[in-house]
Image: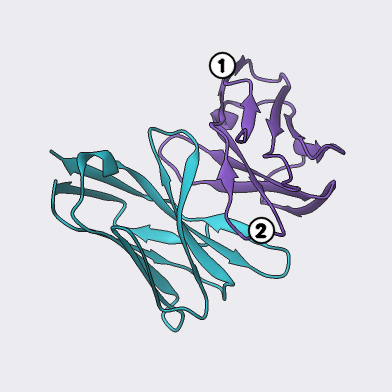
Amino acid sequence: EAGVTQSPTHLIKTRGQQATLRCSPISGHTSVYWYQQALGLGLQFLLWYDEGEERNRGNFPPRFSGRQFPNYSSELNVNALELEDSALYLCASRSRSKGEKLFFGSGTQLSVL
Amino acid sequence: SQQGEEDPQALSIQEGENATMNCSYKTSINNLQWYRQNSGRGLVHLILIRSNEREKHSGRLRVTLDTSKKSSSLLITASRAADTASYFCATTSGGYQKVTFGIGTKLQVIP
């Protein structure tokens, strides 16, 4: 069974540009969570999607947005990139019917220059 | 905002010793989980304890939960160099199942 996959692995952008990060959950998982992990810090909750709907959102500005597609894959978009957006972005998926455990991808390392 | 706060933030021990990490949280929870992260990559689930449980074991891991103090501890017994990683607690609360992580404890096990 394939795990959670994230693409790209690394992404380099300049200030003001837009970034799109992608996540494919484990087959059968309908929930997708996005987290931001800045260097040396914990995971900051960004977004939670379930069954195609945004269920909850962390304390991030509106330029952080996303969506979940009918196949439950998800996209995170960051507009008007700022230097402090440089971080590891982690996606996790969960099966609502099989428990609370999250399965994580390996992350996308976003560098904003 | 961070729900959990791990303590200590960094811990260095010799191989074979036990490692204890603590987690405190602020609001009522449905369950608490511990995860491990190697080298800043994806996290791996270790163990889950529900709000009505007090202690749980899994191999060399022992987790306790004290809901009256809003705290949990993770004990790794007989540590190995391969246990070197960052450890995070995560709480699940509310009907919407938001999962919130702490800032983590960086564990170094010296061979």
Name the secondary structure under disc 2.
loop
Tag 1: residue type?
Leu
What colour has chain A? purple
Residue assigned mark 1: A113
Q: Which chain carries label 1?
A: A
- Residue A32, given in percent of the width and then of the height, sits at 70, 45
Task: Report which residue position mark 2 lands on.
Answer: A98
- As drawn, the residue found furthest toward the right would be A70
Q: How crowded is mark 2: few (under 14 residues within 10 Å), some or many (20 or more)?
A: few
Q: How crowded is mark 1: few (under 14 residues within 10 Å), some or many (20 or more)?
A: some
In the depicted view, which residue is nearer to us: A2 or B41? A2
Q: Is residue B17 above or below residue A69?
A: below
Horizontal and vertical percent for residue B72?
A: 39, 69
Q: Is residue B63 above or below residue A89?
A: below
Residue type of the residue flagged with mark 2: Lys
Picture layout, residue A3 above or below residue B78: above
> Residue drawn at (61%, 59%), measured in percent from left and top?
A100
In the picture, residue B84 is in which quadrant? top left
- Check the residue under mark 2 and report the chain it is in: A
Q: Colour in which chain B is shown?
A: cyan
